Amino acid sequence: MKISTETEYFNEPLYLESGRILPSYNLVYETYGELNSDKSNAIVVCHALTGSHHAAGRYKDEVKSGWWDSLIGNDKAIDTKKYFVICVNILASPFGSTCPLDIDKTTGKEYRTKFPVVVISDVVNAQIKLFKRLGIKEAYAVIGGSLGGMQALCFAIEHPRFSKRVIMLASTYATRPWAIAFNKIAIEGIVNDPEFNGGYYDRYKIASEGLKGMAIGRMAGHISFLSPDSTLKKFGREYVETDGLYELKGRFQIDRYMEYNGHNFSKRFDPLCYLYIVKMMNIFDCTRHFDSLEDALSLIKSRLTLISFKGDMLFMPSEMEEIYKAMVKTDRKNMVEYFEIDSNYGHDAFLVETDKFDFYIKKALEWKK
Amino acid sequence: MKISTETEYFNEPLYLESGRILPSYNLVYETYGELNSDKSNAIVVCHALTGSHHAAGRYKDEVKSGWWDSLIGNDKAIDTKKYFVICVNILASPFGSTCPLDIDKTTGKEYRTKFPVVVISDVVNAQIKLFKRLGIKEAYAVIGGSLGGMQALCFAIEHPRFSKRVIMLASTYATRPWAIAFNKIAIEGIVNDPEFNGGYYDRYKIASEGLKGMAIGRMAGHISFLSPDSTLKKFGREYVETDGLYELKGRFQIDRYMEYNGHNFSKRFDPLCYLYIVKMMNIFDCTRHFDSLEDALSLIKSRLTLISFKGDMLFMPSEMEEIYKAMVKTDRKNMVEYFEIDSNYGHDAFLVETDKFDFYIKKALEWKK
C-alpha cells in the first residue's frame, strides 16, 4: 500500500459560517493507494475529535498504526488495491492543518483565542476545495465515525452530488446535551487550569508536561467512550495491587486506566485546539437551517449507510436510528441502511471492533446505483 | 412536626474495618416526631454522599427544606404523627459528625489526610451505638437512597435483627467501575487543584470561594445524576441567550446548569470530606466477606423493599434487580419487593420525584410480620 503525507497551502480566504474569514490556510492530508486515471476511486475518510489524517499504515519508529488501519489497506474492507483513500486533518486540529497555534497573517502573531470558531460545514468546505485542486470532483464514498460521522452527514446534505455513498458511524445529526455535558468537563478542566493562562500558555512546556486540567477533561471523555457494561467487563472491581484498599489514595484499575489515558493524552494534544474542536462538535446540528430533520435529509442524494453500536453512551443508537426513520419517512427506504452492532465497547467500538462491521462497510462500498 | 438537632459525643474508641481506630467521635443528628414509650416507632433515614442529617423541615431563614421533606412529615409517607424519624450525619461528612477537619486528640492537630478511611459498615456501626444510647434497640424501619441505600443494605446484612423493614432506593450492592469512574473526575479535580495543597488548604478561604477542581468534579457528578433523556427534555439544545453561537466561550443551557451547580456546591462542601466519602462509596461491596451476593443476603431477616429508577445512570435498575433476584433465589420471595419507577430524572429521581414512589414506601412501612 502506497502511503503519502502532503500539505496543501491555500493562499485564498475561507469564508466561515460564523461570518468570519480565514485569510489563508493549510490542509495536511494522507493518502493510501493510487488515484485512478479518471479520478473516480477516491474514498474520503473523516477523522474524529482527537484523530488525525494518519488513518492507516505505520511509519518507521511508530508504535501504533493509523487509527483505522484495520479497515484501510490492501484487501481490507476499504481496499487500497481498488480505492484511493484520502484523510484530511480538520481545521483547528493541532496536527498540521491551520489551527489556533498558527500565525495570523494579518497580525503576525499566533491566533490563540482570536482564531475563529470553525464548524463542521467549514471543515467540509475546506476539504472540498482540496479535492477540487486534486481534480477529484466526485468521491466514490465518504466515511467517518463520531465527529467524522458528522462530517460525512454534512457532505451528504450540503454537497449532495459529491458522493454516491456516505457511511456514518457512531454519530448523531445534532449533538445532544448529554454529550455537551461531557465536553463541559473538558472545557472547565482546561480553562480553569492556571497553566492554561487564558489560552496564552507556553505551548512547548504544555507539550512536554501536559495540562492537568485537560487530562481530567479527557478522563471524563473516556467515561463517555466506555459504557457501564464495558467497564464492568474490562475492569470489574479490580484494585491496583500495590495500593491499599483503606488508603485514601488507593485506586481501582478503572482509576488507573483513566489516569494513564488522561495524562498521556494531555501531552499529545493541544488544549486550545481541543476547545475549538469540542465547540465544533457541540454546535453541530445538521437541521439548523431547516424546519426539521426530514427537511435537511431531503437534500441527500447519496445512499446512506448508518452504523451504530449498542451501548454507545456518547452517541446512542437511537440517535442514528432517528436518521434512518426520517429517511424512510421521506420515501427513501432504498437509499438508507441502518445497522446496530452488538458490542461491549461503547463508543470506542467504531475504532476497536472493526471486525464486527467491516463487512457492512465493504457491502456499502459495493453498492451500485 | 417536632424537629430537633442534637450532638452526641462518644468518649470511647470506634474500631474501624481498616484496623484503625477513631479514639473518640461526635455524631450530629436530627429527629422528627416523637419517640413512643416503648421506643418501637423509630425510623432511621440514611443520607446520601453530599446530604446531611437535615432530612426534613425548614429552619428560620432557610431557603430550602430538608432533602426529603416531601416524604417526611405529618401525614406524609413517613408520617411523623406515627413515627419518630432520625437521620444521623455520617462520619467523614462536613456537617457536624467527626470528619477530617476535626482535631485529632492524639496529636492536638486537625486530622486532614491522617483521618482514617471510613467505610459504610463503620458509619452504620457508629449509628447503632447512638441508637443504643437513645434506648432504641430496634428500629421500625431503615430507609435510604444512593449512599443511604448502601447503609440501609448494610443494616440489613450486618445487623439483621435491628430492623424488620429495610427500604433501599437508587443504589447498589457493590459500586461498579462506571460509578467509580465518575468519582475519579472529582478526585482528580480536587487533588490537582493547587489550592487544595495536598489536603492542607485554608478551609475558611475554600468555604467562601469554593475549590474550582471540586466544582469540575461535581459537574461530572451531575452528569451521572441526570440521563440522556432527562438532559434532552430539560435542556435540549437551548443556548444561553446572551452568548454568541460562534463565540468560543458561548454556552448551552446545560453548560450553565453545570457551572451553576458545580460552583455553588464547591462552596458548601469540604473537598477533603468529599474525597473520604467518595472513597467510602467506591469501596462499598456488601459481598466482600462472602462467597457470593446470595451468601451475603442470606443473613437478612428484614423485609427488603427495593426501588430503582428507569434511566438512573449512576446505579442502574439492573443492579437493584440483581438483589431482588438473589433474594428470590435464596427462597425469600415473600421477604422482598422490587419496584422500578418510570422517571425522566435519572438518579436524581429519588430526591425529586418522591410523588412517584411515596406510596410504595408507605406500603412497605405498613407491612407486618
Image (tube, coloured by chain):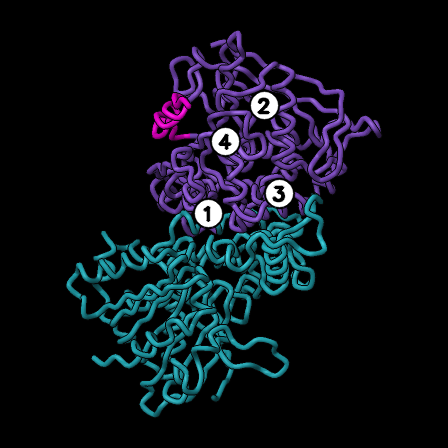
Chain colours: A purple, B cyan
Give me the disc on residue B85. Answer: none
Q: Residue farthest to the top?
A: A37
Instruction: Look at label 2 and name its amino acid.
Output: Val
Give the residue number, with chain letter if any, for mark 3.
A213
The nearer-to-camera label among 2 and 4 is: 4
- Range drawn in magenta: A352-369
B173 above or below A176?
below
Residue B89 in view of the camera: yes
Q: Are marks 4 and 3 on the same chain?
A: yes
Relative depth, front residue between A109 and B35? A109
Q: CA distance from mark 3 to mark 2?
A: 28 Å
- Residue that label 4 marks: A301
SS label for mark 4:
loop
- Answer whether residue B91 is magenta in the image: no
Residue A15 picture quarter? top right
- For the residue labelled by badge 3, is the local secondary structure a helix, a strand or a loop? helix
Coordinates of residue A165 in the picture (x, y in percent): 46, 26
